[in-house]
Amino acid sequence: MPKPTTCPFSGSPLWLASVALMVQSVISTSSTYRRPALGGGGKRTGLMERTLILLDVNTRSPVQVLNDNFLSLQLDPSIIQDGWLDFLSSKRLVTLARGLSPAYLRFGGKRTDFLQFHNLKNLAKFRGPGPDYYLKNYEDAGQPPRHDAGAAEREGSSDASRPPQGAALQHLQQHHNNRSLDKLYNFAECAGLHLVLGLNALQRNPDSSWNSSSALSLLKYSAGKKYNISWELGNEPNGYRSMVGQTVNSTQLANDYTLLRTLLQSVRYYSRAHLYGPNAGRPRKNAILLLDGFMKNAGSVVDAVTWQHYYMDSRVTKVEDFLKTRLLDTLTEQITKVLTVVNSHAPGKKVWLSGVGPAWSGGTNNLSDTYAAGFLWLNTLGMAAMQGIDVVLRHSFFDYGYTHLVDQHFNPLPDYWFSLVFKRLVGPRVLAVRVAGLQRKPRPGRVIRDKLRIYAHCTSFHNHNYVRGSITIYIINLHRSRKKIKLAGTLRNMTVHQYLLQPYGTDGLHARSVQLNGERLLMLDNETFPELKPQTLRAGRTIAIPPMTIGFYVIKNINAYACRR
């Protein structure tokens, strides 16, 4: 989507699409690396100390090539009910969103299936006042509304023992009109984001077929404004029974998507618009059955298959829970399940992780909004890219709760800064990593789950500080001790730029601020990001990554063949 020329401020940070890859452990008999002989007293000698890891990257060809919008954003429709919609005019909020562009902006979530569109006929039939009108300074709009993150209705959850039905279900319906759509679209346009708009799938006819009248009205209005939008239908349809006491099976859902594709083709402006779905929930039994039936009947209707994953619920109270390698590894298991189903019906079809966050039900204060949650987020990006997930949409950019990137005062949280550095340094080509020295001696009956996660990518072509052929490596150290890494093979004796991200202040992993190479990251004003200054490591120097830390490392001027094209 082209960048608007009518926005009153410019200078978005450069986009860096991501390419990630997982560590491949090399056994001690590897032909590339060999353990040194034991010296006197049984101690190892030379560079290969017990804490030293040798690292090399295959620079010949990428193992995955992902979407340029790999790291993207989600915005929950609850902002309409919660009174946040007007704050999309905040200059600071637009600046922060623009920092993560180009990206998709999915306007969807549990509230998607309670939205009804109304075209207010008495409004003037023109596009509206445009971005200049909406981009006023956020201080003029007052303070953001407060929201009880523990409310039972958050994220569509309910404290009632039975789901709402009949009149109660009607009460949950939220109405949005053309003016609210104008605000949403102008926010996305000025931030350089491509809007993916979710339609209500729970509007049903007496025969249980989808009632598309509201959707058709919205399509016609958006086409009249020439809004460049992609579309989806519903959210987590496998959970409708527990949410509202209504069931939509895979066959009916496939028919609904087929009808929506027909509607898009009937509106000339959207005849080639992209359609994504079915936004299945975490791939357990019911979600997998629904996804399998949907792919069988409508796999060719959608441009990408979408599903969601959240790691834990809001009852988590310990920071240690965010550091468990078993928890980090659940994602790769879920991805494997989804890819198996998709490839059985439509081999090669793109797959999106259309909603992901550290926790559902709004998260936990002072945990899912702190530095500790960054380990989950960066590992999610690494694992997803390594397994070929084309796009990852982070829930949520801002709003209530404690799982977002920007807080209620529009200040960036740690996961925002991780995302910004990722965008600046990471491109869409995934490279294979070769590592030696990671595995300790296994204990009988115990699974080895490494606490040092290493991913590699071609550096973004959009980052003009680095020539084509550079490589970006990022490392997650979950150990409680420092780890030393020696670049080997093609990486040997290369100059490295280090971007070391650590908690700022005395709160440790509970910190809500981040420092880069010892300097705290803060917005300079509503329109200006801090400079992301690297620390130069001389050629041949061992990388020392502190405990419980995340670091990005750019290998300059390596002229990697996989990254030159």
Image (tube, rainbow, N blue to C red):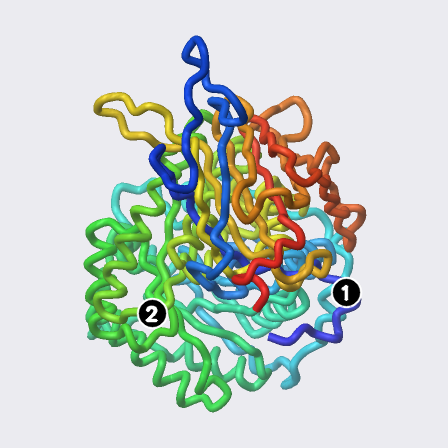
Query: Residue 481 in the image: x percent, y percent?
Result: 52, 22
146 sits left or right of 310 in the view: right
Query: Element under label 1?
Result: loop
Task: Residue under label 2, please give it.
Answer: 349
Q: CA distance from mark 1 to mark 2?
A: 36 Å
Relative vertical location of residue 409 with respect to residue 51 in this rendering, above or below: below
Query: Residue 65 in the image: x percent, y percent?
Result: 46, 64
Q: Is residue 504 visible?
A: yes
Lower sequence index among marks 1 and 2? 1
**Quarter the C terminus occupies:** bottom right
Query: Residue 373 in the image: x percent, y percent?
Result: 51, 37
Q: How many marks?
A: 2
Q: Residues within 10 Å of mark 1 (few under 14, many from 20)?
A: some
Q: Residue at x 56, y 49 (%)?
A: 399
Mark 2 residue type: Lys
Relative vertical location of residue 2 with respect to residue 385 in this rendering, above or below: below
**Quarter the N terminus occupies:** bottom right
Q: Residue at x 64, y 76 (%)?
A: 2
346 sits left or right of 190 in the view: left
Q: Residue at x 57, y 58 (%)?
A: 560
Determine which of the numbered discs, if any, sits on residue 10 in the image. Answer: 1
Q: Are marks 1 and 2 in contact (CB under 8 Å)?
A: no
Relative vertical location of residue 121 with respect to residue 363 in this rendering, above or below: below
> Which of label 1 and label 2 is nearer to you?
2
Mark 1 residue type: Ser
Give the quadrant of residue 194. Answer: bottom right
Q: Residue at x 28, y 57 (%)?
A: 338
Query: Element under label 2?
Result: loop
